[in-house]
């Protein structure tokens, strides 16, 4: 727990409040700062309008962010959280012959993100709703498409802030091995498309260790999800390793991964969404492969500030999030985190059988 413990100590001066039983919303005025890194190998080719409205194709995107977030004071059904992106770096990979144009696009994304505001809502179950990028002009077709793409990619990265505790009004944070609960349709399994995500996914989370300061949980899940308004269905697995503050129930440190494969019956020809043409890929990981890895740590106090680094096609950074990409491909992942009862995650929980409604 050394990394998580350092993050907890570093953030000791931030505003934090114990969570009420059954209520995972942040308290009014509660604030946290995060270093967040997200590497996303896309299941489909995403197009962005580059300089002079030239189409540029994206195969993979990496975001590295310093984010400060604070909860609002309104005590409604959900609690609004407003985040400021203090610093940002964007790296990416594209197709041969478009490196110069793609580099310009990635630097422009950096400029849009740095200083931008991101808002979302947390409900009592700790679920994330209605995320949106503020201060992004929607003037003309290019702005609408370009900022829409940034909003979708940022949403995939910020989804790592959702770690739902057990549901129910009497639920409290598990503090010892053996506690287990289920989260349906977690935010990390949403596709970066404006038409939302269809299908079903169930993530089973389990507390595996605890001390006076931290509770460590691991999770594993399987399901079948699809980008809305397409015929592409992904058989998907996901997992994570998350540390929570025992006193407040708040997230301190998390690493997560998602990997998906297109089913044989999926349509892998061209389709279209609001961000532009989308083409399913046939690459080294198979047709329509989808991989993402995330890493976040809470910041604060006197600890050294992490550096997000530079943006551009040559700025891809190996580290926390890319390690999760490798873990996603490891078939023995389940054996690295044995269940508290001594069994392994070799038999993942079955997904829910009833398809869920679309979610954005």
Image (cartoon, rainbow, N blue to C red):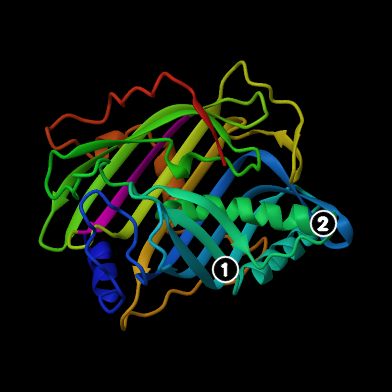
Q: Is residue 181 above or below residue 35?
A: above
Residue 322 in view in this figure: no
Q: Is residue 208 above or below residue 81?
A: above
Q: Residues within 10 Å of mark 1 (few under 14, many from 20)?
A: some
Residue drawn at point x = 62 percent, y = 31 percent: 288
Comparing 24 with 301, the one in front is 24
Q: Nearer the viewer, mark 1 or mark 2?
A: 1
Residue 180, quarter of picture: top left
Quadrant, the N terminus = bottom left
Residue drawn at point x = 44 percent, y = 69 percent: 69
Name the residue at the bottom extreme: 302
Residue 26, quarter of picture: bottom left
**Which of disc 2 and disc 1 is earlier in sequence?**
1
State left or right for residue 151 relative to residue 357.
Answer: right
Majority secondary structure of magenta residues: strand
Residue 193 falls inside the magenta stretch = no
Residue drawn at point x = 51 percent, y = 32 percent: 260
State left or right for residue 337 relative to residue 33.
Answer: left
**Residue 207 placed where, x, y %?**
19, 44
**Residue 272 placed where, x, y %?**
76, 35
Give the CA separation, mark 1 to mark 2.
20 Å
Quadrant, the C terminus = top right
Residue tagged 2: 142
Comparing 18 with 3, the one in front is 18
**Residue 157 placed where, x, y %?**
51, 54
Residue tagged 1: 117
State left or right for residue 104 relative to residue 340.
Answer: right
Residue 239 falls inside the magenta stretch = yes
Q: What range is drawn magenta here?
A: 236-245
Q: Is residue 295 above or below residue 305?
A: above
């Amino acid at each position: 727990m050394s990394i998580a413990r350092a993050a907890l100590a570093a953030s000791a001066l931030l505003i934090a409040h114990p969570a009420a039983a059954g209520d995972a919303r942040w308290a009014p005025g509660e604030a946290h700062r995060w270093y967040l890194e997200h590497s996303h190998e896309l299941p489909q080719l995403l197009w962005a309008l580059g300089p002079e409205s030239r189409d540029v194709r994206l195969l993979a995107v990496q975001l590295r962010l310093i984010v400060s977030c604070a909860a609002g004071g309104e005590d409604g059904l959900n609690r609004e959280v407003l985040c400021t992106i203090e610093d940002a770096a964007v790296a990416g990979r594209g197709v041969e012959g478009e490196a110069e144009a793609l580099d310009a696009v990635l630097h422009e994304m950096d400029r849009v993100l740095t200083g931008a505001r991101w808002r979302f809502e947390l409900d009592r179950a700790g679920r994330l709703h209605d995320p949106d990028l503020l201060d992004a002009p929607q003037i003309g077709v290019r702005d609408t498409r370009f900022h829409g793409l940034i909003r979708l990619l940022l949403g995939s990265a910020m989804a790592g802030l959702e770690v739902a505790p057990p549901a129910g009004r009497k639920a409290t944070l598990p503090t010892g091995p053996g506690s287990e609960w289920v989260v349906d349709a977690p935010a990390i399994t949403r596709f970066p498309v404006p038409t939302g995500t269809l299908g079903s996914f169930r993530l089973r989370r389990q507390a595996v260790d605890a001390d006076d300061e931290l509770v460590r949980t691991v999770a594993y899940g399987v399901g079948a999800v699809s980008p809305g308004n397409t015929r592409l269905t992904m058989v998907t697995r996901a997992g994570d390793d998350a540390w929570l503050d025992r006193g407040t129930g708040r997230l301190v440190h998390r690493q997560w991964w998602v990997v998906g494969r297109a089913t044989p019956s999926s349509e892998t020809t061209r389709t279209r969404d609001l961000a532009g043409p989308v083409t399913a890929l046939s690459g080294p990981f198979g047709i329509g492969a989808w991989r993402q890895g995330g890493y976040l740590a809470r910041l604060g106090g006197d600890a050294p500030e992490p550096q997000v680094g530079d943006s551009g096609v040559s700025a891809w950074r190996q580290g926390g999030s890319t390690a999760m990409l490798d873990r996603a491909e490891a078939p023995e992942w389940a054996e690295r985190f044995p269940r508290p009862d001594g069994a392994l995650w070799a038999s993942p929980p079955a997904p829910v059988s009833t398809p869920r409604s679309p979610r954005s």
